[in-house]
């Protein structure tokens, strides 16, 4: 059972997405999501159902030791993603982008 999860399909567009929660017709909460800044990074996530951290921030706490970075290539080449945290060895991945899909 996914009590803290809502899923829907939408086309990606940079900007803002406002999610509003209702119970019995009354608003119980809201969350504004914004695209991250920079040429590749779209957002950061952690799957924490109760986080108040922004998805467009350049820093994010992990949840259960995990984090998610969403990137979008701007063209062929390499995307270098480096994650670091105090008292942890940095983790790096290089993604080879062969072609950009329309």
Image (cartoon, rainbow, N blue to C red):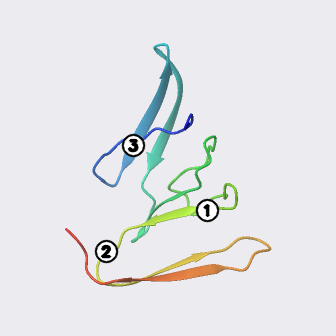
Q: Residues within 10 Å of mark 1 (few under 14, many from 20)?
A: some
Is the residue 38 above or below the residue 3 in the image?
A: below
Q: Which residue lies most toward the left here? A: 102
Rendered location of residue 101, percent (x, y): 23, 71
Q: Write down the residue under mark 2.
A: 74
**On the rendered structure, is 5 left or right of 100?**
right
> Which label sits on residue 17?
3
Q: Write down the residue under mark 1.
A: 59
| Residue at image point 30% right, 53% down | 13
Could you give the CA–CA distance between mark 3 and mark 2, rounded to whole angstroms? 22 Å
Q: Are marks 1 and 2 in contact (CB under 8 Å)?
A: no
| Residue at image point 67% right, 79% down | 90
Is the residue 46 above or below the residue 50 in the image?
A: below
| Residue at image point 27% right, 50% down | 11
Sequence-earlier tag: 3 or 2: 3
**On the rendered structure, is 34 left or right of 51?**
left
> Which label sits on residue 83?
none
């Amino acid at each position: 059972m996914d009590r803290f999860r809502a899923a829907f399909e939408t086309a990606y567009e940079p900007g803002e997405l406002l999610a509003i929660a209702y119970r019995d017709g009354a608003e119980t909460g809201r969350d504004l999501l914004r695209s991250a800044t920079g040429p590749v990074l779209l957002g950061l996530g952690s799957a924490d159902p109760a986080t108040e951290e922004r998805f467009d921030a350049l820093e994010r706490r992990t949840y259960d030791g995990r984090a998610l970075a969403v990137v979008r290539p701007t063209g062929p080449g390499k995307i270098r993603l480096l994650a670091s945290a105090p008292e942890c060895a940095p983790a790096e991945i290089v993604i080879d982008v062969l072609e950009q899909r329309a």
